[in-house]
Image: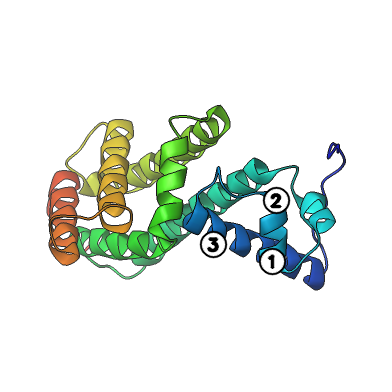
Amino acid sequence: MSHEKKIRIPQQTRSIEKKSRIVDAAMKLFSEKGFQKTNAKEIASEAHVSVGTFYAYYTDKKALLLDILKRHITTVDQTIFHKLNASMQTGISGREIMRRIVTEAHKTHHHPPELLRTLLAMRYTDTDIARLSETQNEALINKLATFFESIQSKLRITDMSAAARVVSNAFEETMHSVAVFDSKIEQERLFDALTDMTATYLFKDPDCPL
């Protein structure tokens, strides 16, 4: 059976709702059974749509997994930078900004741990997943570097690109240790340490209002 046809982009509310059900069903099954052991027919059944409807939106289950990853990365991106921009309007300190970002970053890692583990593992085994992850991650780092440049006078760092990469990696590792793996340290202790580390590293005076 060939599925090489134009993929539908949902426009109407009913179509958008169907696609959302497919995504939710896939996340549930990928979490419960794993990506390799889940097929399109099972996803369609769980979503209460026909197999034909599944293939109207996705060429295969990997295309669906890529869409899930895109949605996750977009949520992280939009949430973090919305919080950064909003925080700059309130005159809060650098430490408070970092704490708010920690809180919002944690909220974006709400998917089941099994699904997040699948996405992480496939970054090292699947070229398409790896390419998308790298592209999106680089875009996020570049936006973070641009933000640092906008408040450069308040920062002790001078290499914005390197700092953005270091901070991004620290956040990613900490969020994964809490949301994906069984951390040996309580969540709040980790978040307090991440806040203090990044604020002290970035800002001349972490407790001075910006």
Q: Residues within 10 Å of mark 2 (few under 14, many from 20)?
A: many
Give residue 61's position: percent from left, percent from top: 66, 45
Q: Residues within 10 Å of mark 1 (few under 14, many from 20)?
A: many
Quadrant in the picture for residue 23: bottom right
User: What's under tag 3, amino acid-wise?
Assistant: Lys
- Circle 3 sits in a helix, a strand or a loop, which is it? helix
The mark nearer the N terminus, 3 or 2, is: 3
For the residue carrying disc 3, how many other residues have a C-alpha within 10 Å: few (<14), some (14-19), or many (20+)?
A: some
Distance between mark 2 and mark 1 Cα atoms: 10 Å
Residue carrying label 2: 40
Task: Give x and y (percent) for residue 70.
Answer: 57, 48
Colour scheme in the image? Answer: rainbow
Q: Who comes first in sequence, dot 2 or dot 1?
A: 2
Q: Give the residue pinned by disc 1.
A: 47
Mark 1 and mark 3 in contact (Cβ < 8 Å)?
no
**What whole-number distance in Å separates the C-alpha atoms at marks 3 and 1?**
10 Å
Numbered disc 1: secondary structure: helix
Q: Is residue 23 left or right of 190 when viewed as pictured?
A: right
Q: How many labels, in total?
A: 3
Residue at 75 percent across and 66 percent down: it is 18
Give the image location of residue 112, x and y in percent.
Answer: 42, 61
Kindly indicate the quadrant of the structure image that contains residue 60. top right
Q: In the rendered structure, find residue 28 and report the number of the disc placed on it.
A: 3
Write the residue at 24% across / 63% down: 99
Q: Amino acid at mark 1?
A: Ala
- Residue 65 position (above or below residue 191): above
**Image quarter of residue 83:** bottom left
| Label 2 secondary element | helix
Which residue type carries mark 2? Ala
Front residue of 80/126: it is 126
What is the quadrant of the C terminus in the image?
bottom left
